Amino acid sequence: MCAIVPRDTAGCQSSTGSTIPVTGAPDTVPGPDGSETAPNAIQVGRLGDAQFARVEAPGYALDPGPATILPFGKVLIVSGFRCNVQETTGISCASEVSGSGFTFSADGFTLQYTDLPA
């Protein structure tokens, strides 16, 4: 589940709320209370770098749902963030303020935005 929270963050989280099963992701991140916990999301804020995080429900899920699906090959630009979905690379989001971003799929991740092919 992925979403843009206007003027705050863009991110994706595990649809089950459990740990993100991606090779190379950290085993723990600081939780909301400061203690170490397993990450269940990858996100980028307006400022700073993209990172793995622990988000509490509903996190990036639309509550109540269902959410609108972003079609492959389209870019959604909202309140300082942009996200796109590609069949080959997965979902990619970035802050238009910092330029930091991430690309995330079932096969892996990078901490950089992947733009749509020209």
Image: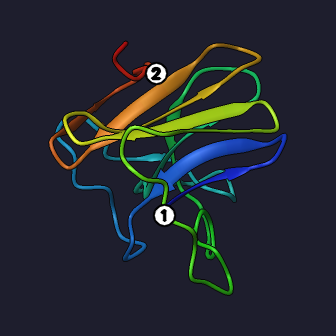
Residue 37 in view of the camera: no
Residue that appears at 54% across and 37% down: 83
> How far from the left and from the top, in percent, is residue 111?
41, 23
Disc 1 marks which residue?
69
* Most distant residue in the bottom direction: 64
> Distance between the Cα atoms at labels 2 and 1?
19 Å
Q: Quadrant of residue 76?
A: top right
Q: Secondary structure at mark 2?
A: loop
Foreground pick, 70 / 103: 70
For the question of whether residue 25 can be seen, the reply is yes
**Picture coordinates of residue 93 (x, y %)?**
53, 34
The numbered disc on residue 113 is 2
Residue 101 location (% of width, % of height): 53, 24
Q: Quadrant of the C terminus?
A: top left
Under mark 2, the amino acid is Tyr
* As drawn, 70 above or below 47: below
Question: Relative to 118, does residue 26 appear above or below in the rendering?
Answer: below
> Please, what is the three-letter code of the amino acid marked with disc 1?
Ile
- In the picture provided, is 31 more to the left or to the right than 81? left
Mark 2 or 1, closer to the camera: 1
N-term mark: 2 or 1: 1
Horizontal side, residue 41 vs residue 20: left or right: right
Eyeballing the image, is 21 above or below 56?
above
Residue 92 x, y percent position in the rendering:
44, 34
Left or right: residue 22 versus residue 8 is left
- The residue furthest front is 118
Above or below: residue 4 compared with residue 115: below
Q: Residue at x 67, y 57 (%)?
A: 32
Q: Which residue is drawn at the image coordinates 31% and 46% (left, top)?
A: 27
Badge 1 local density, few (<14 within 10 Å), some, or many (20+)? few
